[in-house]
Every structure is written in C-alpha cells, then in structure tokens.
Image (cartoon, grey):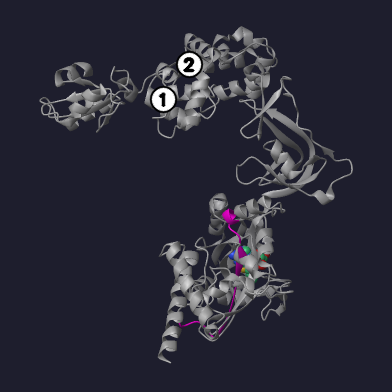
Amino acid sequence: MKAAGNKITRIRTLRREIEDHNYHYHVLDEPKIADLVFDQLMTQLISLERDHPHLQTSDSPTQRVGGHPLSGFDEVVHAVPMLSLSNAFTDEQVRAFDRRCQEALEVTSITYLVEPKLDGLAVSLRYESGVLVRAATRGDGSRGEDVTQNVRTIRSIPLRLMGKRYPRVLEVRGEVYLPREGFNRLNDRQRLRNEKPYVNPRNAAAGSLRQLDAAITAQRPLEFFCHSLGMREGGSSRAGHSETLAQLQSWGLRTNPQNQVVQGIESCLFAYLRLLDARDKLPYEIDGVVYKVDDLGEQTRLGSIARAPRWALAHKFPAEEAVTFVRGIDIQVGRTGALTPVARLEPVFVGGVTVSNATLHNRDEIRRLDVCVGDQVVIRRAGDVIPELVSVVTRERPDNAVTFEFPQHCPACGADVIADEGGAIIRCSAGLICKAQLSESIKHFASRKAMDIEGLGSKLVKQLVDNNVINDVADLYQLDVNALEELDRMGNKSATNLIASIDRSRQTTLARFLFGLGIPHVGESTADRLALHFGSMDALSTADATEVERVPDVGPAISASIATFFAQNRHREVIQRLRDGGVEWALPSAQVARKSVLAGKTVVITGALKSMSRSEARQRLQDLGVRVTSSVSTNTTYLLAGTNPGAKLDKASALGVQVIDEEEFIKLMD
Ligand code: IVH
C-alpha cells in the first residue's frame, strides 16, 4: 500500500515538474533545464504510467502525444459565441471607430489595449477545476469542432492551470499558430516527401490542428497566445481587459508580450506603425493589430453588433500576398552571368506597392512551382524583400497556358549557357564579352557602396555599352563631356555633372574598390576585411591561399575565387588601367603601418628585452601589422630573442626560423 502511495506521489511530482518545464520553455521562453534532462523526466513518467495504467489522467503531460485517430470531429456549441472583428484599413476608419466609441461612452479619451493580430486560427479552451477538458475551433462562431486531443499536444497550452485561485469553469480564447520557422521546416519536409507544401502558415496551422490523428498534430510545432476570455464561473473578475490577460497569464496561459496599453487613438496609430515595422522580425506572422477598449465596463456598455463587438477593431496591414496573372517570363543576365528568370505580372497592389515583376530565382524554381505563362499565381511581397511567386493556382490554368523553356543560349549575347553549383545556377559562358554581364558589372562598380558614381544609372550604362563607348570599367575614366553629349537625351549639363562625379570617385578606399571589382563571393564586408588585412592591392593580388585565409571569415571558397580573379591577365590589366586613369585610395593609418617591412609577418618574442618590456614590444609589433604568436612553428618569420631565451630558441634553430636580437629588431622597426 505504501509502495503504491509512493508511486502516486512520484507520478504527481513528475507531472508537476514536467509541466513546469513546459511552461518555462513554451510560455516564458526561458528553459530551465537541458532538453536531454527533460526527456529523461518524460521517460520516467511514461514508464511509471505504463506500469500503473489506473493512475493515468487526461492532464498528464504524457497525453500530449496524441491518442487513437478519430473518424471525425464532434460538434461543439459555444456557450458564448465566438465573435469576429470589424476591420479597418485606413487611419481615418480607425479615428472614426474611436469617435463612435467616445460618443457612445460620452468620454473624451479612451484607454485601449493594442495587440498584434495573429494570423492563425481561433480556438476556445475550457478548463474545469483547473483541468483542460475541451478545446474547440471557432467554426461559424456558434458551433465549432472538438479538437481537444489535438490541442493537448500544444505545449504552450497548459493541461492544468497554475496556482489555486482560478475559477471553477473558465473558457479562454486565443490563437493557435505556426511560427515561421516551424512553417518552413514543415514545408521542407512536405517537399522531401513529394507532398504539396502549404501556402502559408495560417493554412498550415489549420491543417495541422484539424488532423484526425493527433499524433500528426503532435509533430507540428504549433503555438498559442490567448487574447480573450469566453466566460468564467466563480472567481472574481477584473476591471480591464489588460488585467484579465495578466490574470490568465498568472494561471500559466501564454499572452503576447507585444500587447500594450495606450491612451487615446493617436497612440494606437503609433503602436500600429511600430508593429508594422517589427512585423518581419517577429517569429510569427501577423496581419494587423487589434485595438480593444480596455475597460470592461465600457466594453459592456458598447456591446456588440451582429457578429462583432463594438469595442474592438482590427486595423489590417497591407496584404503581403495577392493573386494575379503571369503575362510573360523573361531572363535577366546578372553581373556574374547567372540567368535569372523573372515573371512579368499583371500589375497588382501588394505589401503597400504596385508590383509588376516577381523573381523566379532559377530554373529549378520554375520546375518546382510548375509555372506557365498565362497562369493565375499567388505573389508575395514581405517588407522590402523582392516580390516572389509563391504558388500557382493550377486548377485555374487556362487552356492556352504556355510552358516556359529555359534557354540554352544567353538571351543577351547568344553564347552557350553552362550549369554550375549543383546545376541550380545557369550562367552565360561569355564573361564580360556579353554586354548584359558587362552592363551589370559596370552598374555594380558605380553603385553607392562601391565607387559611388552618382548619375550613372542603368539606362545610361546600357547606352554606353551598346554603343561601344565603354568596354570595361576602366573606360569610364577616359570619358569626356564630348563623348557623353553624343548620347541620346544627354545634354551638356548632365554630361558635365557625370564627368564631375566620375572624377570624384577617383578618390576612393581600397575596400570600396575591391568590392566594386565584383570578385565572386567578395561582398562588402569581406572586401573591408581584405583591405584591412592586406592594406594594398599588390599584397592581396600576390598573396597565397594560406595568407588570404588568415583573414577572418575567409575560407577556401573565397580564397579560390580571389586567386582565380587575379590569375586573369584581363583583370590585372583593367586594374592597372584604372590606376593609370587616376583611381587611388588613401591608406588609413592602420594600413600605413602595414607598409613596413614587417607587415604581415609572424613574430615570436622570447627572453627578456633591455629597452622595453615584452608586452610593449608586442604592442609595437602589432601596430606595424605583425602577428605576434606565442609558439614557434614553420609559420614563424622571426624569433625575437632577448636574454635567457629558453627552449624557443632551440625550436627556432631546429625549424630554421630566423632569430633576431633586440638591436636588429629595433632597426627593423625603424
Ligand atoms: S479578439 C471578440 N485578439 O481574429 C473579439 N482576435 O477577425 C475576439 N485574432 O477570430 C477576437 N489575433 O481568431 C482577438 N489579438 C487578437 C487576435 C484575434 C488574431 C483573430 C481571431 C478572431 C479573428 C477575428
């Protein structure tokens, strides 16, 4: 009897511990223990429950894995209907809402709770005596489906409320959603299994929650935020919506940390802008914000119309997705020759702007999407990201839709194309002989983060290249006003301005120049680091791979790309002509130092010095661009040996490393 009692206590303790860890991990986002330790606790509980099936309860964390598949969902009648929200799309509609509330309440300013509007699906959770007894979807607002088994698998939903002061019956409402990361992982898996990917996180969340086999739901990383109270029986109620949410939170329910209480409608609009800005950085999708009159007494006085409360309003963000038609597919040839397909679209308003092109990335992506000219498609523009084609509405495909054949030749110059990087990227093989590649590389060279030649736009570059006025970037520095005036729509004033900005670009930095050269894999930050490390073009162009790979974040791929670039006579010649044309860069002080004979060398210091301490010597060497290391190896250039040099001297002699004394060292530094 005693043994059984112990088991019961152990099971209870384990359940409490596990749910507490679930709460810290999923609700507070602050795990207290390692996943492995959590798994061990879970394994213990599972085995205890297996040995004592009569001790099994529905609120045990072992019940979060899904039971027997259902044949269908039971219907649930909501005791209090699940309302929807009225929508607003403009600031004016929002202000009008506020005016209506003020008039009805006869007040001059209202306190609002501003919440993100999650793009998931609403569920209602019923707790009796603190235990989750039923979960239902919203359905039509009056009747939903019983999804208790599935909801139990969501770890941010407590199976048992925390604390003791919860009401006897509590119905909370909130949003079940799939975070972006979980959505992407799920879709990767769908593709891997040759199953259709979900169109968006909302559909994926709905599809995941409405699985008859809850074991499948258990594998989907669904999450939950609660946003309102359905009803309560017993317990005392609060004065404000925000206080109610705080109370729900104290019982272990997850509320959105982005929620904020504000005074007056202008503050609501400000909060809207703040969330619109944060939108892409949040780990889940939101499609707007919800303003709720915070005072519950005021909510009651305002009441509801039809299916939405008068005290709340959803202020929608501009939609990030829209449906339109593909009018054509063009190929763009990039600076490195990559052929990028672009869908020409029937213009459509999305993400706050009119979009008429969407990238199709590469040949494989066209195959994956199965997109034809004439198709109806879903396009997406999130934040400032280039619009993308998300999916094709295949069932709407017109009879005259045309399959796109990826070209075998460069559409700009006719050269053969070659596939690289695993076949995904198709490139024109002609290099800078191809006018499209040449134009793109000149545009890159002149761009703001490179040589920053103001006024040298796409159309002008195209004209210059097409008319053979320039054949490479070095030709830019041979241009004069007369040559430019020959071009279409180029007056004396613009020509003079352009020549002046070309002239200004002559004074540049090594980092900008390197970036402008467009060496594959050398982006802005790599160019910065290379410039700092080498200090000069000559040092970089003659460095071996080992030296190049000493630069932070530079690996074999980048060093190989740099070597290939400088191995080409044509590139070396263009660089020389650029310098002859007057392009130059000042050496920043850190780089001036590196001009010393010691720059880039590796030195080890051993023994005692007379004129300075070892750390002073180290500092002075480092200022000269020397790497000071502590142990002698074949990479060591010099061993600086003071008195009592010890074993390092022996090692240096054995390895044939040159040994210098203090006097020679001082001479070298000067
Ligand atoms: S409150 C009576 N708050 O939007 C008010 N709803 O269009 C009931 N939703 O069915 C909802 N985020 O699924 C509320 N912070 C939020 C919400 C939110 C998303 C959903 C909810 C509701 C739909 C109404």
For label 1, being within 8 Å of ligand 1 is answered no
In this figure, which residue is indicated by the disc labeled 1?
531
Read off the magenta span.
164-182
Q: In this view, does 184 lie to the left or right of 555?
A: right
The span from disc 2 to disc 1 (Cα, nearest Å) is 17 Å
In the image, residue 341 lies at what x, y percent?
71, 34
Quadrant of the rendered image containing residue 615: top left
Residue 75 within the magenta-colored segment of the rendering: no
The residue most toward the top is: 482
Crowding around mark 2 (Cα neighbors within 10 Å: few <14, some 14 to 19, many 20+) is some
Give the residue drawn at x 74%, y 24%: 411
Give the residue drawn at x 66%, y 73%: 147
For label 2, being within 8 Å of ligand 1 is answered no
Q: In this view, does 228 lie to the left or right of 419?
A: left
401 vs 188: above or below: above
Q: Which of 436 and 570 is in front in this view?
A: 570
378 vs 34: above or below: above
Q: Which quarter of the image is occupied by the N terminus? A: bottom left
